[in-house]
Image (cartoon, coloured by chain):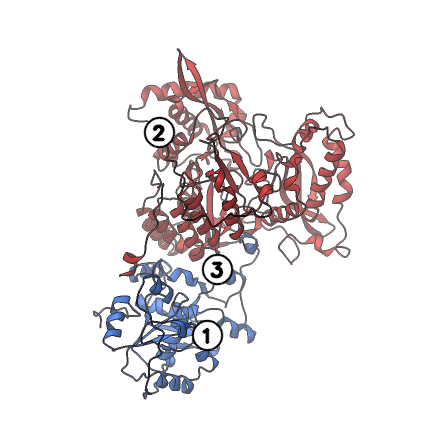
Amino acid sequence: MSISKLTPSSVDSAKPKINWARIDEADNFANTVKLYRQGKYDEDSFRRFRLQHGAYGTRMTSDYAMVRVKLPAGEIYPKQFETLSRLSEQYSIGSAHFSTRENIQLHWVILEDVSEIFRSLAEVGLTSREACGNSVRNVMCSPLSGVCSDEKFDSTPYALATAKFFLRNPMAQSLPRKFKFNFTCCEKHGMVRMVDVGLIPEIQQINGSKQKGFKIFLGGGLGNRSFVGHQLEDFTPEEDLLYTSIAVMRIFDRLGDRKNLARNRMRYLVNDMGWEKFQNLVLKERAIVRATQSVVTKLKVDTTPDKITRPLKISDEGGSSVPDGYARWLKSNTIKQKQSDYRSVFITLEAGDITSNQLNSMAALIREFSSEGKARSGFVQNVALRYVHEDDLVKLYSRLLETGLAKSGGLTMTAPVGCSGTTSCNLALTNSHRLAKEIQRKFLELKLDEDDDLADSSIKISGCPNSCAQHGIATIGFFGGGGRLGKDMYPNYQMSLGGRFDADTTLGQTCLRVPAKRVIPVILKIIELFKANKQSDDTLKSWIHRIVNDSEDSDIKSIGDIKKVLEPLVAPPTKEDDPDFYLDYGSDTSYHTKTGKGECAA
Amino acid sequence: MCCLTESVKVTTDIDSLRSEIRDNSVRVIDVRREGDYKQDHIPNSVNLPLATLLSDDSPERVLKLVNSLGIDDETPVVVYDDTFGALASRVAWTLEWIGHSDVTLLETTYGNWKSLGLETDSLTPEISNKEHSMNLQSNILATSEYLESVKSRDDVILIDNRERLNYLEQHIPGAVSLPYRTLASSDGILRSKEDMKRLFDNRDISGDSEIITYCGSVGTLSGLAYYALKSAGLSNTKLYVRSFKEWKNLEKPTDKQQDANYWDLSAE
């Protein structure tokens, strides 16, 4: 073939440091699917195998799977974006989906094609191995780690090393249930108290010298029942990071509930046992691990700094004029880095969806604008393009406008999180995915992204009580269910208020049930109440925080007061008066709840 | 031409085509629009816009067109387009259908040909008419009646080459989805033979079955699939050339994936 030799290949400034893939897993998967189709593999064993390899079941069918590709520490490189773009067209629905845990998912993939995806992922060093099932799930890291002005040090290398250590590690292949690590940069950009193991980088003076380490939080998590994590000790030095992780996993492996699937996450174990007892066990176990592990058992932390090179500009087409909306976008989508002259740019997607063309554009944008030559997936189904030089921001914004990636409000309440809901998930009761998009469209139209009072609040919507969209820690959170008037069913959401995921992590308090078609007016009403009752320096988040903590003294003092105002809005009309009320978003047939078997606990 | 393997040669590579053009031993057909062709094209190629063919693709008309392009039973023909090979496939298949056996697709698109800096020309060659015989290959054509007649046979595989979302929304009952994008490689209109074989093998699409391909309206995407299957040695393949458009117009039954709002997961 003469073509490939002649086609110029683009040179990337940064290449992945770690190859997460193993090509033989593609062949193995293809063969196992064949055996399964021939009836030589039983359902349960096959399901466990499939999940271990990152292929999740799909709503109401066994013909399709969802392939969840892990992006350890959220890192993603241009060539990886290009491969995902191609795969989304070949084997999926022409678009991909960013999750809240730094995975990128391909939905509606024919089970027999999954191995072809593995093969292509392996060419660019990516894997979906252990992205589902009872394993160590994708190890997350704050998208601002390394650039955050409040961080003690960059925890990214530790997140990558932890991911590498546990991936395919025999000790993590058959845990009682899934197990999650979140690293962060600082308290504010958090998510560390809502996970099995959460870690904040910390530096302590020990015997006159600076020692790196972490504040470790254990036993948190969101789900049908959510718990806030507990801090293990003041300071865990970096040498103890791996020993602590192993100790915690050993205890969970030994004592975790393997029978009751509904309550077998580690947070239940911690809750049942009591924190102090669990804490003691961890500290004792860690002493044993430290004493018995071979000296070669170490995290391979690669702290070589990344090369920061501003991409060369071929030409600067004249005095580029500033496009409309630039100031609005700059304010609500970018953050100044600790490195002077650089910003991190957050690209917001509708509920995490990105087209194959946009995936390709992302590769080009990294090459043109990111001085680190890669991007990071964020916590809210978004992508962070970091190390963009201040002087290149106008040009970047123009390029984002061309590719439909320039939505403003990325770091505000106008970018809600929505899980996949009834678009593909077996457990979903409502179309939370579409609702998140509807809210974003409406709120951007109302320019709510320009309202500083709303900037630090969040909206998160799950399609069922399980918390894939993390609704429990949202300022305004929703989870789906069915409502009923007489014999007629309508899509409904339970709303909670006052959740947060920073240093004051709290779970939202249940307020009331809101029918799907009333969610937008209800949120607008809450904003109206806030505006009428706020103190001058209040944000919606701080106002609601006082209400849920019984320390507000305006007319609206409690969740009950809010509920009273909202109740008239949520009363169901009859089907004759308002047929649309009985349809879920994106559906033109009568609403009824319908679910299949979930695989979170498989 | 090529070695003796089970799979049929369906594409011609760039280097071979260039030497065949130099030797004047090939008829090259450009299926793009006339305006595009007049601007520039592969040297010595003739123009047969797909729309011209489709305006009347009865065997008699096709035979006339073929004669006017200077093609007789022995002329090797290579077809190219600028749309990932789908339009070229539809034209190549039509030639096969009236009984021309030596027809292949250029392995790449015209756009890529140009970006590689290969020779182009704006001259229209002088062509003298030839006489092609008519030998209809009805074994490579599927009609809606034929589809109905085989629907209960389990040794017939029906393949839908439209995009996945279209398939989920509506398809001919029993069809399996194989989006046309799956067929290409990053630099050619078709994957390598090995890659193609593995893909079909995983899907249990084998030579033991008769295969029928269809797409949205005129058999272009499914025409490409027809050649993809042939390249992998699956020659017992038919093209349902009037495709889903006809099926729907005839109000034949369709299936859809129920109880899921997959469109809302799409970013467009």
Q: Nearer the viewer, residue A235 or A445?
A: A445
Q: Quadrant of residue A541?
A: top right
Q: Nearer the viewer, residue A522 or A487?
A: A522
According to the picture, the residue beneath numbered tag 2 turns out to be: A301
Question: Of all residues shown, which one is farthest toward the front?
Answer: A318
Q: Mark 1 or mark 3: which is in front?
A: 3
Rendering coords of residue B60 (x, y %): 41, 87
Given the image, what chain letter belongs to the residue carrying mark 3? B
Q: Find numbered disc 3 in the image and state the secondary structure of the residue it sits on.
A: helix
Judge whether A558 appears above or below A362 on screen: above
Given the image, what chain letter belongs to the residue carrying mark 1? B
Q: Nearer the viewer, residue B78 or A267?
A: B78
Chain in blue on the image: B
Q: In the image, what residue type sits under mark 1?
A: Leu
Chain in red on the image: A
According to the picture, the residue beneath numbered tag 1 turns out to be: B147
Given the image, what chain letter belongs to the residue carrying mark 2? A
Question: Is residue A100 something one can see in this rendering?
Answer: no
Rendering coords of residue A599 (x, y %): 49, 44
- Total number of numbered labels? 3
Q: Find numbered disc 2 in the image and state the secondary structure of the residue it sits on.
A: loop
Same chain for mark 1 and mark 3? The answer is yes
User: In the figure, is residue B192 to the left or right of A91?
Assistant: left
Q: Nearer the viewer, residue A460 or A144?
A: A144
